Image: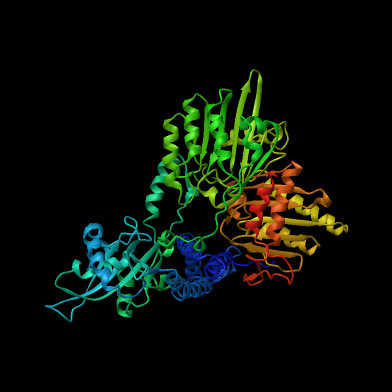
Amino acid sequence: MSLFDRDLSWLSFNYRVLCMANDTSVPLYERIKFLSIFSSNLDEFFRVRMPAVLAVDHLLRNDPAAAGNNAISGSTLPAIQEEISRQLGEFGQTLTRDLLPALHNNHVHLYYNEPVHASHQADIREYFLTRVLSFLQPLWLHLSKPEEVFLENNQLYVVVSLSSEAEPDMLKYALVNIPSNQLPRFTELAPVDNVFYIVMLDDVIRENIGFIFPGYTVNGCYSIKITRDAETDMNELANDVLEQVETMIAKRELGIPTRFLYDAAMPLPLRQLLAGFFRILPEEMVRGGRYHNLKDLMDLPMPVKSPQLTYPRQPAVNIHSLETVPRLLEEVLNRDILIHAPYQRYDYILRFFNEAALDPTVQEIYITLYRIAASSQIANALISAARNGKQVTVFVELKARFDEANNIRWAKKMKAAGVKIIYSIPGLKVHAKIALVKRRRGYVWDYAGLMATGNFNESTARFYTDHVLLTAHRGMTQELELLFLYLQTREQPVRYNYLPFKHLLVAQFNLVDRFSEMIDREIANAREGKPARITIKLNNLQEKDMIAKLYEASEAGVEVRMIVRSICCILPENSNITIRRIVDRYLEHARIFIFHNNGEEEVYMGSADWMNRNLHRRIEVCFPIYDPALQEQLKEIIRLQLADNTNAVMLDENMYNIPVKQEPGSTPVNAQMAIHAYVTALNN
């Protein structure tokens, strides 16, 4: 069984993001945003994945026999470093050769590694003296006291080479912070000849660096950035989980270096000096450009307002049948509702929780929150519900990487309002996207459930493609209640001496077995000469056993069609396996599973990617779509994505992104535009 390396596969995905910045059919400012996304993704890779890659490489260099251990594959560090270097080179060329000239052609000029126009120097100096200077903390690098200097994670600095008039041959070095986390990275300047100018904070400081060191001559000024290991062991938590997570967040920023990014113009002796001073290993040194943290390009000002520079507006669609219903909860009790974000308005989800908070017949609300919006209206609705006397139980996952602090803040706020807060389970993450509302009318209890492929987060719902099912299906909602009971008590749910979950697929209980059974059914059908097909859409595919099942299915004659956005460790070993990737204006985030079942197709959605962590170390929930009309909606959305011949690529055995060719005479299909048109037409 062939498996592609997960980290090289992820780099293939990030390269596809970079390719979008190179695509001239994409509007200019959107291309710049794709550069920003590429840079942000790479930063996270160095924080989260590079520590493991470096550790394996170190182990194998010191103990080559460890490669015989099945748990350890050979070191991929050289291949990873080579690919990152290649991509960064293309990144620089894309920005300087294509995008900056294109900006200038649209009357916007970003100063980038060039002298500042004389007419701007006075304004830049004034800005430096009045706005920037108070944020600077220059430090001399005393070679005998390296412990006195600590580089903060992913913060920007310049190392300044200086000499004094008294000792012109004696070089001294100082460190100056670039406070881009406190001040805007970009500042607009006065137009010159109908061209709008923008200067970076880095250059505001460089232009005035001599002011900081009176009596010295500045010989050179070189940017640096250090990235630190962010992979704290959240699985070992016990007892006071909240306190431990808060401690781990603080420790994360003190993690060991995984990348020391330096200006390529930096002289070798200075580079060697800094490596020794900050205890940087050779494999952690990464050559970069004059400017780092170019994820900040997401905030590049747009002084020229032109519709051609950004994607055309694609407003979220109203669902007409929901606009006129007096109570959304009543509608859910009558029929299943499926919402496709961001194509349809996420406001219906907000409305559901808002109504539940005020409805006098609603007695109990349960929900899992993995990544809470910074200004969460859902969390505010839960607070209102608790203050209105309802029993509100919220499972807050404190181990959601890089969102821990925000989740803790909201958890404390909700708890203060009377919400019952349940914190993380040691050794498990709860990644399921589920909610349950219980309403009592006399002696009758009504249950309404929400299950989704993405977080209950109205901020990300604007640009993540996800699906939310609202249902009163008795079997599914009762199983949701059992799962919430388990999350509160940690006691295995038992139902009538049978398996507790018949409708829901729940990781740690039945999810892997049920998916395996459905794959086996397709294999059996193929061997009997019946049509057999598996269609899967995921963010990531890496778990070996599930990959083995898919290989087995393809070898038996099952057509295996996959849409995998990011990590993909399966290879198209035969003609029955096809793998597509779609990167476009929205982040493809949904998980959908369709099994042909000899013409009686079964359709599932859910939160679970097929990764080791999702299937074996998390609580995940996948759920069936029973309503035939809603099944058709999902199948049509998948059909449009499989038909995409403008942005979709096919992954080959080398994980290269091969553009899908538009056949002569065929109609161009952009899946995301076509899906927006499709959900708009659903109202008709």
Residue 632 seen: yes
Q: Nearer the viewer, residue 133 or 585?
A: 585
Relative height, residue 512 to residue 214 (above, below):
above
- Horizontally, is 240 left or right of 199 in the view? right
Q: Is residue 599 above or below residue 61?
A: above
The residue located at (50%, 62%) in the rendering is 30
Horizontally, residue 384 falls left or right of residue 606, namely left
Residue 331 placement, left or right of 21: right
Q: Which residue is the extreme one toward the bottom?
A: 169
Q: How many marks?
A: 0
83 left or right, relative to 334:
left
Residue located farthest toward the front when viewing the structure as drawn: 193
Task: Name the quarter where the C terminus is drawn.
Answer: top right
User: Quadrant of residue 503 in the image?
Assistant: top right
Q: Position of residue 462 (x, y in %)?
A: 54, 49
Q: Residue at x 57, y 56 (%)?
A: 586
Furthest-left residue in view? 166
Answer yes or no: is residue 547 visible: no
- Image coords of residue 373 (percent x, y): 48, 44
Q: Position of residue 316 (x, y in %)?
A: 58, 48
Residue 403: x percent and y percent?
A: 46, 48
Q: Residue at x 37, y 68 (%)?
A: 194
For the rendered model, the colour scheme is rainbow
Residue in view at x 42 percent, y 65 percent = 294
Residue farthest toward the top in the current orientation of the protein: 442
The N terminus - image quarter: bottom right
